[in-house]
Image: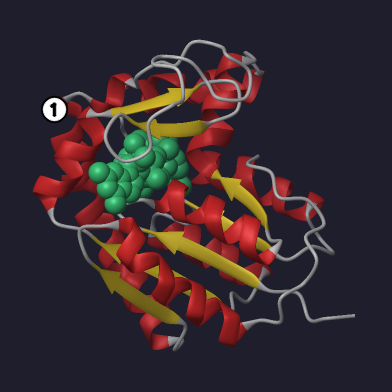
Amino acid sequence: MAKLFRAAIMGPPGSGKGTISQRIAQSFGLQYLSSGHFLREGIAAKTEACLLVKTYVERSMLVPDHVMTRLMLPRLEQLSGHSWLLDGFPRTLGQALALNNLYQLDLVISLNIPYETLKERLSDRWIHPASGRVYNMGFNPPRVQGKDDITGEPLIQHDDDKPQALMARLRHYKDVAKPVIDLYKSQGILHSFSGTETDRIWPYINSLLSTKMHTQPSDTCQAQ
Ligand code: G5P
């Protein structure tokens, strides 16, 4: 059996983590777990644990580490036996250390995207809330305006993509990401990618992953 591969992707809001994660999951057969999607899904389903974090998510504030790790680490336990990719977790040094106690990551991808690019992208972003599928009216529009390609259900915009919330998210990201980036750098597993277009960054990530892992038949490739 091929060795399990464990990876994480980091980057500010709108940097393309979700878009790139979906491509990685499809191309390399990794299970893909997005912390933001997982929280929003739990909030929509009104699960007790996720209702506690609703206020944080709605205000684009980081959910406290002890709550986040209590939610995410059991999900990872359910994925034992699979290779996986984490999108948006760990976000803080506390989360990274909690994860580190249980799993050794093979690779961390960090996306560096200019602020102006992030602002433009997020104001154009629409999502399908049930699945977490992400569209961008310029870059990746739905086939029918305002409707999800697969289900035909209406698309919505996040409250946290509005300009004030976005500034707060970017400030937070910078502060909390630095020690996490330093940790993964010191472990020799950090790979950073800079640019303004996902399509131009993607071939480098694709080629990095191809050399780092054996391409395996996908067991399932779904956003969780
Ligand atoms: P999330 O959901 O993790 P963010 O803010 O980190 O939220 P977000 O906003 O989902 O990340 P992304 O995944 O980095 O952004 O980017 P994306 O969705 O793929 O792309 C953004 C847009 O740009 C899309 O419309 C896409 O189509 C478009 N796009 C991509 N590439 C290009 C391109 O090349 N060109 C153009 N023109 N467009 C492009 O977290 C949400 C909340 O959950 C909580 C927090 O409250 C957080 O605010 N949370 C946590 N709290 C604590 N700890 C954690 N670990 C937490 N995780 C989540």
Left or right of residue 80, residue 1 in this image: right
Q: 74 or 211: nearer the eye?
A: 211
Is residue 42 visible in the rendered structure shown here?
Answer: yes
Residue 63, how many percent across, how many down? 42, 37
Residue 139, how many percent across, how many down? 31, 41
Q: 77 or 194: nearer the eye?
A: 194
Residue positioned most to the left: 116
> Hey, which quadrant is residue 110 in on the image?
bottom left
**Residue at the spot of label 1:** 163
> Hey, which quadrant is residue 191 in on the image?
bottom left
On screen, 195 above or below 41?
below
Residue at x 26% of width, y 67% of height: 178
Q: Helix, strand, or loop for circle 1?
A: helix
Residue 188, how many percent across, how many down? 44, 89
Q: 37 or 176: nearer the eye?
A: 37
Query: Residue flagged by tag 1: what amino acid is it?
Result: Pro
> Hey, which quadrant is residue 218 in on the image?
bottom right
Residue at x 73% of width, y 47% of height: 74
Q: How many marks?
A: 1
Note whether ligand 1 is within 8 Å of mark 1: no
Q: Quadrant of the C terminus?
A: top right
On screen, 151 above or below 163?
above
Give neighbour class at mark 1: few <14, some 14-19, many 20+ (Cα, 10 Å): few
On screen, 67 above or below 57?
below
